[in-house]
Structures are given as C-alpha cells and as structure tokens.
Amino acid sequence: MSSEQRRVVIIGGGFGGVFTALDLANSCSVTLVSLEDHFLFTPMLYEYVSGEVEAWHIAPRYKELLNDSVRFIRGQITEVNFDTREVAIEGRDRRLIYDALVLACGSVTNYWGVEGAEEHALPFRTLAHADDLRARMIRALDRVPPDAAPQDVRDTVTFAIVGGGASGVELTTKMSDLLREAFRRRGLQGEARVMLLEMGDRIVPGMESDLRKHVTDALANAHVEVHTGARVLQVTPDGFSFEQNGKKSDVRAAGVVWTAGVRVSPLIENLAIEKDERGRVLVEDTLQVRGHEEVFAIGDIALYTKLASPNLSGTAQLANQEAGLLADNIRHFFNHRPLGTKTFHELGEALSLGTENAAVLTAGQVVEGALARQARFALYTARLPTWQHRLRVGSSWFFEGTSPRPLGL
Ligand SMILES: Cc1cc2nc3c(=O)[nH]c(=O)nc-3n(C[C@H](O)[C@H](O)[C@H](O)COP(=O)(O)OP(=O)(O)OC[C@H]3O[C@@H](n4cnc5c(N)ncnc54)[C@H](O)[C@@H]3O)c2cc1C
C-alpha cells in the first residue's frame, strides 16, 4: 500500500488535531472526527465574549478549513480497539479502520468534586459557553431598576470567576470592562462586582514576574476583587460559598464561572494505555503511545517531556508545535524511516487584559496597553489555521475594526 492510501484517523479537531490533519492532507488518507463542526481558537474566546471578534473569525468550520483533502466526520469516538485497529463513533454501526491513529481529544473542565459546581457553575471552553456567559451578564443588567442604589446594583450584578490562572485573569478584566461600559450606557449607579477566587497564595503562578506586575495592575485598574487562598466550597443556582483565612462567606452571584483546572477527555480515561497520575498518556519522544507504535498522542492529553519550559504543558502553543513533528513522524512511520524528536520552546506570552489593554511578553520584554492589544491581534492572525482563513480574518480586523459589542442596550 502506498503512503497516500494509508488511513490516518485523528480523534479531535483542536489545535493538535487540525494542524496535524492540514499537514498530512495530501500525503495520506486522513479522517478527522470531532465533537463540533468547527475548530476553536481558544486564546480569543475572551474577545468573542466581548464582541471584539465574531464566531467565524475564531471558529472556522472544518469544511472550510479542510476542503476535500481531509474527510471530516462530526461525532464522538466512544471506543478504540487497538487489536483490530478500529474506532467506534457514537450512533454509527460502521467503525473506522486505521493504519495510524492520532489521539488529540484535549481536556475538559475539572470541577474537583466541589459541591454543585458541575451543575451550577458556567464552564468556559466553547462558543456556547461564551454565549451563555454573555447572556447571563445581560440578564443580570436587565434585572437592575434604573434608580437602584449602588449597593443594590452591585448585589444584582455580581460575578465570580474561580481560578486565578491566565484564563481567570483574562476573563475578569474583560468582563469588568464590558460591565463598566454597560453601566455607563444604561446610566446605572455604582459598579458591578467582579470577583476572582484563587485557592493558591498568588494568581498566575509560574508567570514571569515582569508580566505578573502588569497583570496585578490591570486587575486593580479594572476593580476586580482578587481573593487568594480562597477555597470555593459550594456553588448553588444563585451564588456560592467560599472559605478564606478560616472564615466562611456566602455570596449571592448572577454567575460563577469555572476556570480552575482541566482533566483529560473522558475517552482517554477509559483507554487501557499507560498514563501518569493526572491521566495524561505516556508518549515516547516521537509522540508514539507507549506499547503501540501506530498510535500517537498529542496536545493536552499527552505527557511529552522534551519541553524547554514546564509552562508549555497544556497549551495551544505546544499542541500546535507538536502537530508538525507528528505529521512528519506519521509519514516516516509509513515509509519505514526513523522517527524524529524535538525540544519545544515557549513562543512568548500574550494576555488580554480588558477591552483596551493587553500585555505581550516577547524576547524578555513586556509590551502593554493599546499597542500590545494590536500586537496580540496581529500575532494571533498569524497563528490561525490556513493562509486563506488568516487573510480573510486579517482583512476583516484591519478594515472593519475590533471594537467590543455592548452588552444589550
Ligand atoms: C478559554 C481558553 C483559553 C486558552 N488560551 C490559551 C492561550 O492563550 N494560549 C495557549 O497556549 N493555550 C490556551 N488555552 C489552552 C489550549 O486551548 C489547549 O491547550 C489546546 O486547545 C490543546 O489542544 P488539543 O488539540 O490537545 O485539544 P483541543 O484544542 O481542546 O481539541 C480537542 C478536540 O477534541 C474533540 N473531542 C474531544 N473528545 C472527543 C471524542 N471522544 N471524539 C471526537 N472528538 C473529541 C473536541 O471537540 C475538540 O475539538 C486556552 C484554553 C481555553 C479553554
């Protein structure tokens, strides 16, 4: 069988899966299976909440991205049979047969068993989650009578974000700016209460200290109420409780958003392959799954150890870089050539810090403010999949602008 006829099945159309599929498109027979009908550029999900970008910018449909060069199936893989080399898709009798399999199904929100969190907190990983959060903010604002006193307004428009990592910081600063602008437009008194709760003793652990300073300043300027050493005990339909310095507090909130951690996709949890204590698949330096030379794992679910910085683990920039190595290795595997390996490096950090502000760390220097915001848009245009999509999005941002969309009127 020639290399072009070899069947590659990729499970998951995120950063790892899509970039691998695009790279392999004309060298093998590639089938991509994923839960949604679109890719999602997660680093800009905050800009989608604020309306600075539209869905088509950051979530292009696979049909558009992959053309006819890759077969796309929307569905959920429920089972992998490593002996017969087949995968099962929910609701379909026919199984897909592979010569090489790529596990790229990413992670899901981890609620750490906190009471009520899975039922009542809002996750923040998809377009639908972002739509829900935006709708929740508008509903809270609509409930405020025009002449309400500042304290009553604040109680009605309280939002809490659990998890003080980059995601929590980016989301709180964005929400705070959006809500402030909504207050101004609606003539409401006072301001919204936006809380950021982190269980550890500091926010954004592991972040460069220069960058951390900008983050702390941005949170203060946005009037985000930061609680470190704060453990959320329970989430209810109308609020949450947390413990800090041995004291328990109950807070009424219009929304509690959960950004406090991830765990590997349930599919991986159910596979009988070697994993670490966090459930990540143990892979060789070639990205091959231990004990299965024709199975590869990539992105959030894979424990790849050749990293120049531990901060790379669980990031889009790692999954994206791994995809190039993986596609080469699959070609080598089919052609019976030795497989390669690589050490991956950080490509810099770019954080959104509100609707007018951002911070970009590049070559050891931090740039901030409106210039950094523009730089972040430019940087991310270059990281979108396919040059055709980059061109369309880049022109749209350049000619039509990237102003936020107000929260109702
Ligand atoms: C809001 C947010 C912001 C982020 N910002 C950044 C950032 O600024 N920089 C950065 O480097 N990283 C960021 N990340 C992390 C980054 O998104 C992930 O590390 C990256 O997406 C991992 O890529 P992946 O291919 O492993 O998984 P994903 O991109 O999550 O893709 C997994 C895919 O698998 C599909 N799937 C899952 N289970 C199945 C199944 N059983 N069958 C079929 N398909 C399945 C899913 O639908 C999904 O399409 C962010 C994450 C979030 C949620």
Image: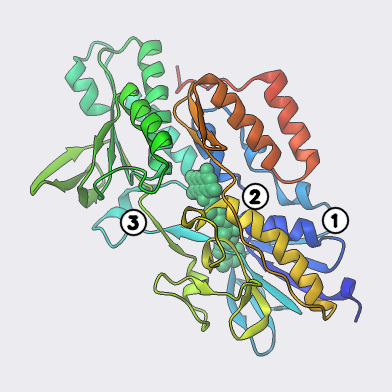
Question: Which residue corresponds to mark 3?
Answer: 118
Residue 190 quadrant: top left
Residue 111 in the image: x percent, y percent? 33, 58
Tell me: is circle 2 under 8 Å from ligand 1: yes
Quadrant placement of the C terminus = top left
Kind of residue sitting beneath label 3:
Glu
Question: Which residue corresponds to mark 1?
Answer: 68
Mark 1: which secondary structure?
loop
Residue at the left extreme of this rendering? 247
Residue 339 in the image: x percent, y percent? 74, 74
**N-terminal of the two: label 3 or label 2?**
2
Number of numbered discs overlaid on the protein picture = 3
The answer to whether residue 351 is seen in the rendering is: yes
Residue 406 in the image: x percent, y percent? 48, 20
Residue 59 in the image: x percent, y percent? 64, 43
Question: Which residue corresponds to mark 2?
Answer: 39
Instruction: Answer with left or right where residue 363 lies relative to residue 245.
Output: right
- 275 to 46, vertically: above or below: below
